[in-house]
Image (spheres, rainbow, N blue to C red):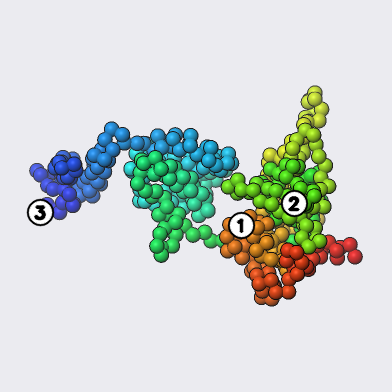
Amino acid sequence: MSKRKAPKGCFWRDGVLYGRIQTGGRDIKWSLRTDDPAIARSRRKAERDRQIAAQRYGDHRRTFSEALDGWGKHIAEQISPKTFDRYLTSLDVLARHLDGLYIDELDKALVGSIVENRRDVPAVPKGRKHPVTASIATIKRDLTALSSVCDWMVDEGWRDDNPVMAWLKPGGRRKSRLKERRDPIVLPDLRHVQMVIERAPALFADLIRAALKTGARLDELVKADRAHLDRERKQLTVIGKRNKLRVIDLVDDGEDFGFECLSALPASIETKALFWHRAEAGKRARLGQRKAERYRQASSNFGRIVEAVAGQAQKQDQDFRPFAFHHLRHLHAVNWLKSGRSIYVLQGRLGHTSIKTTEMYLTYLTPEEVQIVTLGQGASGSKSGNRPSVSGSAKSQKGQ
């Protein structure tokens, strides 16, 4: 029986496959301890990679664990605590793929296997009971954290490249294989928003009103201090994504866009927060009412309110479509444009880096309305249009 063909870089000797590589001017031969060509190919590659790494890095071959420690000390001062925590969460998820590796073993193929595993193999997320596959958005978020570590390694001279970028932002004409499929935005009904506002306690109802009027994100409003509200200029300064400051006009061409709501908020000397609450003390508490504090779980609180409204509506056979807090931002944007106001002013209000992001709201406009908000035809006033917003029109009709 003739011998099977030896894989590239291998040869037969006494019925056993041997590997052969050349590195550092040396010709290295060793037994692969198998007669299976597939196993031999795999073992030769592993040894070849090890020898090349040893030749290049010598005794200074770095581990991914070392890189993670160095990156953590550096990046903590460069990004917000919230972003840092999100990065750590993503890296914790990826740990099973990266633990024990040397940094030179992290290549495009490994990143690809991570993507494939996260996309196709169900896993039980932290805090969940049932296994699910990760969405493209979640995978990209995890890779962004890994890319940050790789960028640090490049800056330190530990690596020459960042293999993650080949997946996040492929060069040339190649399109990313991690393209997200965006579902159409379903705007909440103003009547349903009002049902939630009526159910919300104290200042939380004003928090919902403010989101609808200003277009600010939940996190931006929760973090806002009283000092951020300029009553004279009728503006609110918020801290947006990537810790960037943004100023939102609360009045436009004489129409209120949040000033009435925000200027009427009660203040507490116990906190700087613009929106605050006072948790109820337990039955056995000796100190009575608790100290006023900023909302800590606003997103969860909103979800519980919406769930309660949905349950009540079902019992009373009422029409109600649940919605997320972020959908109030979408509703604000569409209302703004439908009133004939400039899309470029809206871009600034929402804090969008690219006008392309803001243009997704044009879907909800007629061709004539698109012409007005993009070219300014028919618009007047100091900012843009002079027609009342949709929410303003609904409010005036209700009062008639």
Is residue 129 visible in the rendered structure shown here? no
Q: Mark 2 or mark 1: name the one nearer the start of the chain.
A: 2
Give percent across and percent down for residue 201. 80, 44
Answer left or right for 159 relative to 39: right
Q: Considering the numbered disc 2 on the image, is that residue within a helix, a strand or a loop?
A: strand
Q: Picture coordinates of residue 197 (x, y %)? A: 79, 51
Residue 270 can be seen, yes or no: yes
- Mark 2 and mark 3 lie on one chain; the one further toward the N terminus is 3
**Residue kind at label 3, given as amino acid type:** Ser
- 252 or 123, nearer to the observer: 252
Residue, x 80% and y 58% (percent of image)?
256
> Residue 235's mark?
2
Which residue is drawn at the image coordinates 44% and 59% (left, top)? 176
Spatial distance from mark 3 to mark 1, Cα to Cα?
A: 68 Å
Kind of residue at badge 1 = His
CB contact under 8 Å: marks 2 and 1: no
Q: Which residue is mark 3?
A: 2
**Considering the image in quadrants, where does the C terminus appear?**
bottom right
Q: Nearer the viewer, residue 301 or 258?
A: 258
Q: Nearer the viewer, residue 86 or 280?
A: 86
